[in-house]
Amino acid sequence: MTCSRCKTRPVIKLPNNNISLCKSCFIKYFERKVRKTVRQYDMIKKGESIGVAVSGGKDSLTTLKVLNQIIKPQKTTKLIAIGIDEGIKGYRNKSLNIAKKYCEENEIEFVVASFKDEFGYSLDEAIKKIKVIPCSLCAVFRRYLLNKKAKELKLNKLATGHNLDDETQSIVMNMFKNNMETGARLGPVTGIKDDKKFVRRIKPLYFLTEKETATYAFLNGLINNFGSCPNAHLAYRNKVKKLISDFNNEFPATKYSIINSFLEILPDLKKKYKKSKLKYCKSCGEPASKENCQVCEYIGMLKNG
Ligand code: SF4
Ligand SMILES: [Zn+2]
Ligand SMILES: [Zn+2]
């Protein structure tokens, strides 16, 4: 077997396109696809300040690397990496050190915010105090803190490392839980309508699979062995991930079909939920789906033990 473009030794077979690519052709293919997504969804405008949520994992470092390549020559556009320290002993400290090193080597500003400083509890402490699924609390606190930091830094958009596999899982999870309004906020650019209290997320890796992202990260020395989060096995997402993967192994176009069907109905979903009035938390004033936002509810539970 040879590379479908230059006839040298391939490093990856792309089942969807039925082509094999060598290292250099694959890197070009990957970066071109990210640039196309950024352009197609108007993710970055000249002069904007763009944040990248960076954990030190392969997806976020890949996003940071490719966006830095796109933004650097523009001069007027600014890029800042934001790390969130949830306080997961033996895991997050290691991954954030890797992110810090990468940013130093590439002259990218790196800002870190922690659960402990913001909420008074690290994730490890919080899940000892109250009975919750760690990932549920972690995701709510992280989303809030990223948004807060992005506003403080006056960022126009916040890029995340979500890839095609992550998005298919989110789509299916929202369907399984009948959360279509939350589903309407997904897509390559998140949110339903502009809200000055919410910095929109962009997902430059939207059309690249987990396998493609891992391959790109590996070929560029961005894979680090700090293990996985000790709470990951408890996540609902993991069960959905396994289900989609099993199905995709038998029917390889499944993930693309989920994404493409979703993108077809997304404009109608956004239109439908655009009419619902934006609500703000009575305690903290941040966007909320109920009277009190989920962050304030968790903080109340933590205070009351
Ligand atoms: S696996 Fe769960 S607890 Fe661990 S970092 Fe991710 S969301 Fe947080
Ligand atoms: Zn090639
Ligand atoms: Zn609140």
Image (cartoon, rainbow, N blue to C red):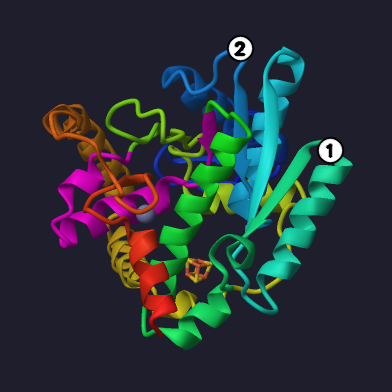
Task: Using residue 166 as the reference point, say whether residue 218 is left or right of it.
Answer: right
Q: Quadrant of residue 293?
A: bottom left
Q: Which residue is mark 1?
A: 106
- Image location of residue 36, percent across then percent down: 50, 22
Tag 2 and tag 1, C-beta contact below 8 Å: no
- Mark seen at residue 266: none
160 drawn magenta: yes
Asked if the residue at label 1 sits under 8 Å from ligand 1, the reply is no
In terms of secondary structure, where does tag 2 sit?
A: loop
In terms of secondary structure, where does tag 1 sit?
A: loop
- Mark seen at residue 46: 2
- Image location of residue 38, percent across then percent down: 51, 24
Residue type, numbered disc 1: Asn
Residue type, numbered disc 2: Lys
Q: Residues in magenta?
A: 157-186
Label whose residue precedes the other's in the sequence (2 or 1): 2
**In this picture, is 176 found above or below 281?**
below
Residue at horizontal 24 percent and vertical 46 percent from the top: 183
Q: Quadrant of residue 68?
A: top right
Between 19 and 198, which is closer to the camera in this rendering? 198
- Image location of residue 62, percent across then percent down: 65, 44
* Ligand 3 - quadrant of the structure image: bottom left
Task: Using residue 233 as the reference point, say whether residue 152 is left or right of it.
Answer: right
Between 163 and 99, which is closer to the camera in this rendering? 99
